[in-house]
Image (spheres, rainbow, N blue to C red):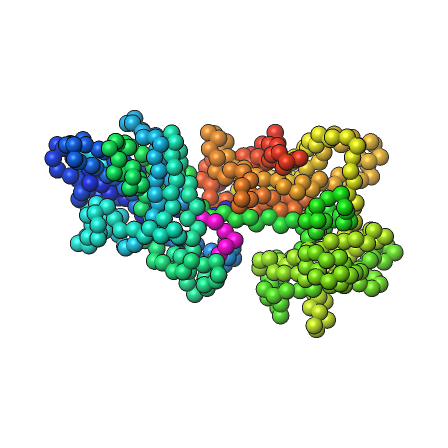
Amino acid sequence: MAIKKYYATKDNTITNAFKANLDTRGVSGNMGQSDVMEIFSIYAQANTSSSEFSRLLVQFNTDTISTDRTAGTIPASGSVSFYLRLYDAEHVQTTPKNFTLVASAVSRSWDEGNGLDMEEYSDIDASNWLSASDGILWTAGGGDYWDDLSSSFSQSFDTGFENLEVDISPLVEQWISSSANSLTAVDMGQRTNYGVGVFLTSSNEDASSSYYTKKFFARGSQYYFKRPVIEARWDSSKKDNRGSFYLSSSLIPASDNLMKLYLYNISRGQLKDIPGVGTGGLLVSVYSGTLANTAPTGSKIGLSVGGGTVTTLDINTTASHVETGIYSCSFAYTSSAITTIFDVWHSGSTSTEYHTGTAVDVNTFDSEDYNFDQRYISKITNLRPNYSINENARFRLFARKKDWSPNNYTVASQNIDTSIIDNVYYKIVRANDNWIVADYGTGSTNHTRLSYDVSGSYFDFDMGMLEAGFTYQIKFTYLINGSYVEQPENFRFRIV
């Protein structure tokens, strides 16, 4: 699971716009319970020297983010990105284009209020253009904000119909810095969470032209997936080469010669750190197998420099803690005479052996004398028709080459091995309207990249991010020869 959504707990639109009489400004108006939020600037509507502005405020419960970090649901600071996402609300009025919005941290507490009126601004309650809350004024009309680089962010809009999606990771890290998130080199310090204000840049607001009007859905919207959200994204993929282990080769880049193996420490169905090791490191040694390849035997095999191996022909490579109960090591294997190996995980200093892995078959990289066209058949082998909204589901992907042609002997005598594709990404869409709930994370965060192990590829997904009562479908794209190739299969399920 590499996506987690945190929805807004309060929001509001504040404005100094004139009312319909073009004489009185609606500075006391409150729109805290409206289902949309609005941003605009209007130039010279009442007279040649007048300007009117509208800004929005939105806040999220970052205690939940902090709790999830402590529980290991989301990774440590520096290994996860947080995106502020607001969704465009279509309307019948004009929509501006070629403008920039700023999302800046609010620097003081404010109340949401119960107002709804975005026409006459007649609902006077709590926060508004002048007041942060009942009886507490903003230092400056329109809100108080931090404007340093770690607290203020921007996005340009070309057509005006785009959604807002901006990386606010430094700010979120400041909000959740606490005893549960001790300060590290990648932390930005601490700052109290009062949410963000979103508004036009000062150059847009001060322009001798109008930008009227940009609207976003508010947290009270009937549209489940269009409410304001902070979306955490991170790369949780684990590339366990136990089922796709290769001999080091000069045909491929050095980084591709490093093979990864994992240890999964499971106690009574739960992943748990090894006592005495915790989040520390382990050593891993490699052995050849017995004649029947049922267990390790002989002396430790010397390894080449790379990954966790720092000395030529070192008989140990270093493994590190990945997450609760999971450890991994990385090394290059060059002993071509031994084609089945066993990995033994141990302490080194106390000679305590913690785990012996299953037999690893060593494959070899081969070049071809033709330019191949690789196509696959894909299937989720454990797909169910229905899932609960309260579960985290794991989906197992089976893939085989499309041109695989078995004969009668092959079908009768062998299991069909899954093909390990190094980079596979998933997408989840709502079936009735093709609304993209989770898009392919093929960018820098790789947040929808699948893991793989000896059984093939897989990914975990928090069903709590989906709306119950609807059918969804999963699609995959494979990175093949430098291009992303979307697979034709759709896998459907329903949330109950």
Nearer-the-camera pick, 266 or 372: 372
454 relative to 144 in the view: left or right: right
Q: Quadrant of residue 198?
A: top left
Residue 489 is a magenta residue: no
Provide the residue span drawn in magenta. 77-82
Q: Quadrant of residue 44?
A: top left
- Residue 334 drawn above or below residue 389: below
Q: Quadrant of residue 283?
A: bottom right
Residue at the location (21% across, 50% down)? Answer: 140
Answer whether residue 491 is visible to the viewer in this image.
no
Q: Return the x and y of residue 419 as percentages of the image width and height.
A: 71, 40
Spot the residue most to the bottom. Answer: 350
Residue at the location (80% across, 60% down)? Answer: 301
Residue at the location (61% across, 65% down)? Answer: 280
Q: Return the x and y of residue 277 as percentages of the image width and height.
A: 62, 67
Spot the residue most to the right. Answer: 291
- Residue 162 drawn above or below residue 342: above
141 relative to 392 in the view: left or right: left
Nearer-the-camera pick, 66 or 152: 152
- Residue 37 drawn above or below residue 81: above
Answer whether residue 77 is visible to the viewer in this image.
yes
Q: Return the x and y of residue 261 as percentages of the image width and height.
A: 69, 54
Q: Considering the whole magenta stretch, tell me its main secondary structure.
A: loop
